[in-house]
Image (cartoon, rainbow, N blue to C red):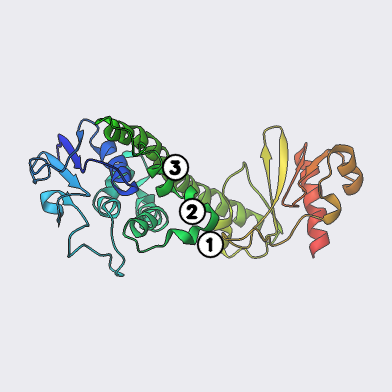
């Protein structure tokens, strides 16, 4: 498909058409964004995609609106915003454009849809009360993106369009960072699973570098693991393993006697030459060598078991 125009509505903008534009401008970098409510522009034509305006959802005609009476719904009955509709039809192609490995596209497509796209859809449709974010309500991505709109009393007729294009750069950073992070997670899973197999029944998992590890530990059912060690620059780190993604609780904490200690004080407390630092929260410790960090890990395990 060759497109010349990406058409969305003029005036103030919301997160959904802004994030839709992130996807579409990556796929059609030569296409011009047209922000208009003029019938000349929001009438379907072969040279355009129309989204968040147009009063219809007609993928064959290239129209992706969700404001009409019979607005499209997900299979579970939850509403789409324009972002959800654009992601549904263009998301896989977008991931290919970002060089996501083919083997990971379906998983990342679904993960991004449920964790990033769906919340935007729900908030845009009023199906999710912003108050659920509590004191962080003004720091949600939709709120932050919409804060980039010009103030109400700016009379420059070009202000909204200019702000939209500036906000597009910000929105793109968040979307692509999220995709990169998810893609990295899948790369890491393979490495962590290999390390778990090599560790066998040991309580300590050694990794070749810092990387996301908890999902792979859960995926493999490695409930026996308590701590992870890996190099970090010239040093080595010892970290705990959280019991879940929505808590700071760990399977095991580092010894209380290490909390907040550094250098000689930590060496004295551990009896390990080269011990350098233990966070007061007891979730990470640092030593200057692999030998030292493994000795600290053994001590931490002995205190738990």
Which of label 1 and label 2 is nearer to you? 2
The residue singled out by tag 3 in the image is 180
Label 2 element class = helix
Q: Is residue 274 above or below residue 135?
A: above
45 left or right of 134 in image: left
Separation (CA) of disc 3 from disc 2: 25 Å
Q: Are marks 3 and 2 in contact (CB under 8 Å)?
A: no
In this figure, which residue is indicated by the disc labeled 1? 219
Q: Which SS class for mark 3?
A: helix
> Where does label 2 land, which residue?
137
The label nearer to you, 3 versus 1, is 3
- Provide residue 53's location: percent of width, then percent of height: 19, 49
Location of the C terminus (image quadrant):
bottom right
180 or 65, which lies in front?
65
Q: Residue furthest front?
A: 153
Q: Is disc 1 placed on a helix, strand or loop?
A: helix
């Amino acid at each position: 498909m060759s497109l010349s125009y990406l058409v969305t509505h003029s005036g103030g903008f919301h997160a959904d058409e802004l994030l839709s534009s992130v996807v579409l401008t990556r796929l059609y970098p030569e296409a011009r964004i047209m922000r208009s409510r003029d019938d000349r522009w929001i009438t379907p034509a072969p040279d355009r995609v129309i989204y968040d305006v147009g009063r219809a959802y007609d993928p064959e005609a290239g129209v992706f609106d969700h404001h009409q009476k019979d607005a499209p719904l997900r299979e579970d009955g939850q509403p789409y915003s324009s972002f959800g509709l654009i992601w549904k039809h263009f998301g896989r192609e977008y991931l290919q454009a970002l060089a996501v490995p083919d083997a990971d596209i379906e998983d990342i497509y679904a993960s991004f849809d449920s964790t990033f796209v769906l919340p935007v859809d729900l908030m845009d449709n009023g199906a999710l009360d912003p108050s659920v974010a509590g004191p962080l309500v003004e720091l949600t991505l939709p709120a932050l993106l919409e804060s980039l709109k010009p103030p109400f009393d700016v009379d420059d007729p070009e202000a909204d369009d200019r702000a939209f294009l500036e906000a597009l750069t910000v929105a793109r950073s968040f979307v692509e960072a999220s995709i990169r992070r998810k893609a990295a997670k899948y790369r890491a899973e393979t490495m962590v699973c290999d390390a778990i197999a090599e560790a066998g029944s040991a309580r300590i998992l050694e990794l070749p570098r810092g990387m996301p590890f908890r999902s792979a530990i859960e995926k493999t059912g490695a409930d026996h693991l308590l701590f992870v060690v890996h190099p970090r620059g010239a040093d080595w780190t010892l970290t705990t393993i959280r019991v879940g993604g929505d808590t700071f609780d760990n399977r095991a904490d580092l010894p209380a006697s290490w909390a907040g200690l550094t250098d000689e004080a930590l060496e004295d407390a551990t009896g390990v030459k080269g011990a350098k630092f233990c966070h007061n929260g007891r979730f990470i410790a640092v030593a200057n060598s692999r030998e030292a960090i493994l000795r600290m890990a053994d001590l931490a395990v002995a205190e738990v078991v």
